[in-house]
Image (cartoon, rainbow, N blue to C red):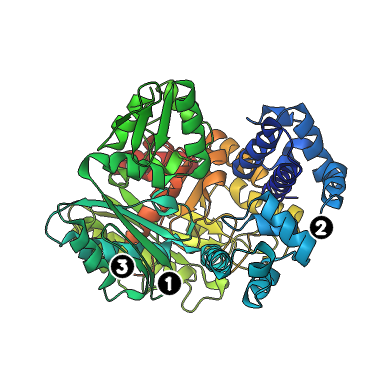
Amino acid sequence: MKNSEVAKVFQDIADLLELKGENVFKIRAYQKAARAIEHYPRELKVMIDEGEDLRSIPGVGEAIAKKATELITTGKLGYYENLKAEFPQGITNLLAIPGIGPKTANKLSSELGISSVDELERAIKEGKVAKLFRLGDKTAENMLRQIQALRRKDQRIPIGEALPIVEEILAALHSVPGVRNLTAAGSLRRFRETVGDIDLMGTADNPKEVIDAFVALPQIAQVLAQGSTKASAIVSNGLQVDLRMVEHDSFGSLLQYFTGSKQHNISLRERGRKQGLKLSEYGITVVATDKLEKFSLEKEFYSRLGLQYIPPELREAQGEIEKAEQGAIPKLVELSDIKGDLHVHTEWSDGHDSIEEMARAAKDAGYQYIAITEHSAGRGIAHGLDVERLRKQVAEIKALNKRLIEIHVLTGVEVDIRADGNLDMPQEVLSELDIVIAGVHSAMNQSEEKMTRRVINAIENPDVDMIAHPTCRLIGEREPIAIDLEALFQAAAKHRKIMEISAMPERLDLRDTHAFRARESGVKLAIGTDAHSVAHLSFMRFGVGVARRAWCEPQHILNTLPLAELLAILSKNAA
């Protein structure tokens, strides 16, 4: 059972306890445990198997640790099953709808027999809900709008698809005269791998002009609501985008509030309450005097609470507030720290551009180096390189390096890890390269034990420098392979091997929690775009976003090193 499944059970318990009217502190304990477990970088099953105490997880006490152990080891939790039996089936589904509280959910379930969102939608359209509450169609229509909004939010799309659309909108709106601030908030700004609705925040001398320009953009397919300072619309791919404009001196408060996450903001509000302060999107109110303090900058907002500024990517209620209180938030890696790309394909295999075109584009991006890592022939990709073609490519790269200025091309290969754990190229050619990346591209349905042994074989191979996209997932298309990442990280640390954060937007593999754990295990990480064209080199920012969510500093990422230091490390790994 995965951490996400355990977290879902504890969140359901919290919802059911709220239905019962239980003590609020008991409810919060389960909510806190659910958040902590969902985002914890290690799988609880691994911790239990290795005899580790689950109470070491922030927010998990003795009682919840016992319940988690029972759930993971048996697949069921008696306490949860007994609690569910006290209520009509499916009632927790109704609580997921904004605006429907425990009493309303209970009434819908007990009096109309509704146990799902679909059933509620049908009952609203048939007029049953309006009659039940004697409040007319207005209340029922509001519920229906919330259901539609929830469905849009559930249809999360990869950040790689959402970000370009948002950037087009922001670029267009920045041209409106008088705009001073304009940025995305929410999960997009926190750089989560998938996003739901998009929140845009801004200030301008004439907010209405910005709103009018927004709803008139060609990207807008449908306007849902429009006022003088707010607007909501659906863009062409079905994503909902909300734009909110405020006074210049309130921008920091607004941006902080709508960046979230929800639990991060709850924790901040609790901290403020203890200080006699009330937090809102408008600023911070001193309760004793009812005086509202406004903040044009987020940094000032956090400082007022006695906290170091917390980067958006870390705002997930995972200990960042405690770190900020101690002034211990690290300087996270930035795109400007990256000195080169270590995973690039060209027209020699399945790429679209030449080696020189990729190299010159890398130079234009400010890089010192780029590694050409074509697929090996056994991968089955058209034009995968065999030994003879790889050696020809190496000769071309060496000749090219004599002509290029301010950019160095590294020789390399992305060699397939065969089903039996052997590599798809002989040692004599691999040992001639600057960098060897090994990855799984076939036989992905192997058992966890076989897959783990297969990849560890590659890690133990002295010619391998890095493991590419370690879980092989494609977001929303292909589930990760069954593999023991803890075992991989231990082997990588022991043999001084690199684990990749693939910046390809549909991969983002390692994901943030896995990269966090790899870093904690002493494993060096590298961000590679897996670029197949010049345009793909820009994907590096997605990998940097993952690294920042994993609390990575520049020294944790191999390709922040200058060329000479990089080559020294790669040479040492090969020794």
Q: Name the residue under label 2.
A: 88
Q: Which residue is drawn at 21% across and 61% down?
A: 208
Q: Position of residue 241 (x, y in %)?
A: 38, 63
User: Which element carries disc 2, helix, strand or loop?
Assistant: loop
Name the residue at the front extreme.
Answer: 134
User: Which element carries disc 3, helix, strand or loop?
Assistant: helix
Left or right: where 186 falls relative to 122: left
CB of mark 1 within 8 Å of CB of mark 2?
A: no
Q: Nearer the viewer, residue 56 or 535?
A: 56
Name the residue at the left extreme.
Answer: 177
Q: Which amino acid does label 3 sit on?
A: Ala
Q: What residue type is labelled 2?
A: Pro
Q: Which amino acid does label 1 sit on?
A: Arg
Q: Which of 365 and 14 is in front in this view?
A: 14
Q: Where is residue 242 in the image (x, y as percent from the top left)?
A: 37, 60
Q: Nearer the viewer, residue 120 or 64?
A: 120
Q: Mark 1 points at which residue?
A: 389
Which numbered disc covers residue 535?
A: 3
In primary-sequence order, the first of circles 3 and 1 is 1
CB of mark 3 within 8 Å of CB of mark 1?
A: no
User: Which element carries disc 1, helix, strand or loop?
Assistant: helix
Which numbered disc covers residue 491?
A: none
Separation (CA) of disc 2 from disc 3: 53 Å
Q: How many marks?
A: 3
In primary-sequence order, the first of circles 1 and 2 is 2
Q: Which of 74 and 489 is in front in this view?
A: 74
In primary-sequence order, the first of circles 2 and 3 is 2
Left or right: where 130 falls relative to 515: right
